[in-house]
Image: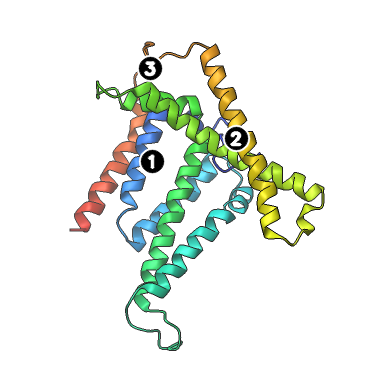
Amino acid sequence: MAGLIVHYQPGISFLHRWDSRTKFLALLLISLILVRPSFLIYLSGSLLFFSLMIISRMPLKPFFREFKFWAVMIIVLFLFQVFFTPGNRLPFFPWLPVSREGLLQGGLLSWRLGLWLGYAFLFTAVTRPRDLSEALVWMLRPFPFVPRRRIALMVSLALRFFSRFLDRVREIRMAHQARLGDRNRKPLRKIKYLVLPLLRRSFLEVDEVTYALLARGYQENLPHRLPPLPLLHLIPLVFLSGVLVWSLWVAR
């Protein structure tokens, strides 16, 4: 398994029992709030994220241990922003092509991307794929000419295949290490032994999912009924909407 990242983790916390439609809207509101580069907003978003992690009873140490791959990407973007943003040089290291503006913009950009990824992974960890599909169908209901079920199915399958892709990568690497393949110093050979089995197993899994949908008589015109939204589940959305309006008003 790929662990906590992009995998649903069963639980009985409030976030697990929160309606998937309001969870999806809350994720959109938080993403919009984090668009504005502000230290206060990012600090509040970080405190909210850690509070939600505690409320959802997610283990923090394994979560951040598996976050290290994405952390490397964020660090690369930070360094790119630092070295290629013009501005005033640092007085302590004048020989380095690093500016104060680059450090500020790179830090805020990395912070924002980290929060976006953290909230997205937390959302997938506390939301079942079926609930996410139903939430997307519900949100696309006002658009009559949009294939709601098809879009919802494609999004849920994309998340599913992405998580399975990470699972396959880990399984192939562990099998390669068990056969002492990590001692091979040829990078092209390592890539060959990783990519070819990964592509083969991915294509086979796509065929299996296609046949499974056909065997179950998948149709897009089936009725879709969801219970009304509980009023208590809308209270966090009202709070986040107020924060979004405040951030837009301050940014003027």
Say which residue appears at 48% left-offset and 60% top-offset. 74
The residue that label 1 is drawn on is: 27
- Residue 119 location (% of width, % of height): 45, 45
Q: Is residue 184 above or below residue 21?
A: below
- Residue at coordinates 74% horizontally, 62% vertically from top-left? 185
Q: Is residue 223 above or below residue 182?
A: above
Q: Taking 54 as reference, is 154 above or below it?
A: above
Q: Amino acid at mark 1?
A: Leu
Q: Where does residue 120 sit, x and y in percent of width and height? A: 46, 43
- The residue singled out by tag 2 in the image is 202
What x and y, as percent, mark residue 233? 37, 30
Gap in angstroms between the C-alphas marked 3 and 1: 20 Å
**Picture layout, residue 38 above or below residue 237:** below
Residue 157 screen position, x and y as percent: 49, 30
- Marks 2/1: CA distance? 30 Å
Dot label at residue 226: 3
As helix, strand or loop, the secondary structure at mark 1 comes to helix
Sequence order check, earlier mark of 3 and 2: 2
Q: Earlier in the sequence, mark 3 or mark 1?
A: 1
